Amino acid sequence: MQINVGILGLGTVGGGTLQLLQRNAKLIQRRTGCEIGVTAIVVKNLEKARPLAFDAALLSNDPDAILNDPSIHIVAELIGGVAPARDYVLRAIAAGKSVVTANKELIAKHGAEIMAAADQAGVDFRFEGSVGGGIPLIKPLRESLAGNHVRQLMGIVNGTTNFILTKMTREGRDFEEVLAQAQALGYAEADPSADVDGYDTMYKLAILAGIAFGAPVSIQDIYREGIRHVHARDIEYARELGYVIKLVALARQDPDGEIELRVHPALLPTEHPLANVNDVFNAVFIQGDAVGDVMFYGRGAGSDPTGSAVVGDIIEVARNLCRGKSGQLASEAAHPLRIKDFADVETRFCVRMQVADRPGMMAQIATVFGEKGVSIESIVQKKSDGETAEIFWMSHRTTQRAMARSLNEFNRLDAVRDVASVIRVEGE
Ligand code: HSE
């Protein structure tokens, strides 16, 4: 039997998927037990030059060339974004086709709707490439670790921000300068917001947490902060204290079942397994009640790595089709997640501030922290210019509420010239 695949979108991931299907065709046929052929490719712009070897007759700019073609069994949706991808995916499913995608925003926002439609239609819907590029994450979480209560999941799942933070750390340069260089090198988009403001990481966390905790996670329940406010000075102080700064995605379930979901820069101890995940690499660190600690590491983006994940999904779906069955995993019985109020979430904090260098200053700040219930663990003060001193405080665990109240109070103190940054500490 030949399984026919239609590819929607021939950008970085679509191109990688097509090339891998061609390059490893014999291996894939042996492993699948049937032949897989790409029989249609739909792109937006037919005129665009493409450095790929393929039969130009397959190309069209009409999505119906795939969606309305009854000979196509599997649709690989690789255009990204919600519109028109959602519509195409739902139409493909309604037409009885299985769908494979790497579209994190689509899954994070409409995953439950699409999975229900796939269940109903009895087709497969797979999305391994949507998180961590080539790193196997969805399948291990959904299958191999299914017997575990996931206690915590913490990951570095955005290559662009990890590249920027790594460069800032190695070269002591500030965010804007490194971002401009990353853009020039093609590692960051001209509009970098999706990456540097944490949206991409938030979508990926919604997907991972949804699988880890067995229920859809709304992106509205995820606290999100990006890396624009991380300064070279913060990285330097962190290093002095034995930490590195990373943009982390974190999902944690308390013993009483409440779940916290957050994306923000965090200080990680240099000995933490995620602290040494550098450049464009991604990693996810999972703690299960039975398995203990597990870490997944690899290339989180790019043509070949993400193509590897998409092709893996296509092979799995093709195997099912060849054996005449749908491999769609039955949805779990719905059980609403209990999301913890972010104000109640406890973390340690680092606060860098500029203060007037005069007697009693430290006591005033310590009093505010004390009154709001924030306990100080350590203080680093740098040389003053005679007028202003820079102080870097590290707190013990405290709630977000207590820290927010302290920061409000500092705004009222004349002597606090500026609260330059507030960064949480994780991984201890
Ligand atoms: N913009 C993403 C990243 C690409 O930088 O990791 C993969 O989702």
Image (tube, rainbow, N blue to C red):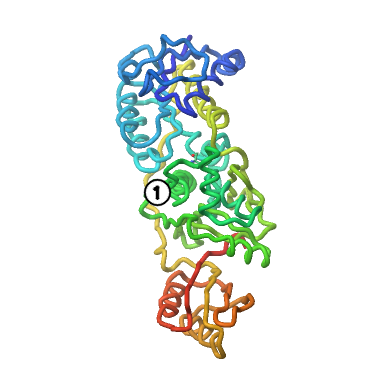
Q: Position of residue 346 (x, y in %)?
A: 50, 68
Q: Position of residue 49 (x, y in %)?
A: 45, 20
Judging by the rendered image, the residue that carries numbered circle 1 is 217
* Residue nearest the viewer, comparing 408 with 333: 408
Circle 1: element type = loop
Q: Is residue 142 placed above or below 22 in the rendered structure?
A: below
Q: Position of residue 193 (x, y in %)?
A: 42, 48
* Residue nearest the viewer, comparing 123 with 312: 312
Residue 341 visible (yes or no): yes
Q: Is residue 146 placed above or below 428 in the rendered structure?
A: above
Residue 143 visible (yes or no): no
Label 1: few (<14), some or many (≥20) within 10 Å? Answer: many
In the displayed structure, does residue 54 sit left or right of residue 81?
A: right
Q: Quadrant of residue 115?
A: top left
Q: Position of residue 71 (x, y in %)?
A: 37, 11
* Residue nearest the viewer, comparing 311 with 10: 10
User: Could you tell me which residue is drawn at 58 percent across and 60 percent down?
Assistant: 232
* Residue nearest the viewer, comparing 8 with 171: 171
Q: Quadrant of residue 26?
A: top right
User: Could you tell me which residue is drawn at 39 percent across and 64 percent down?
Assistant: 341
In the displayed structure, does residue 323 sit left or right of residue 218?
A: right
Q: Amino acid at mark 1?
A: Val
User: Could you tell me which residue is drawn at 52 percent across and 79 percent down?
Assistant: 355
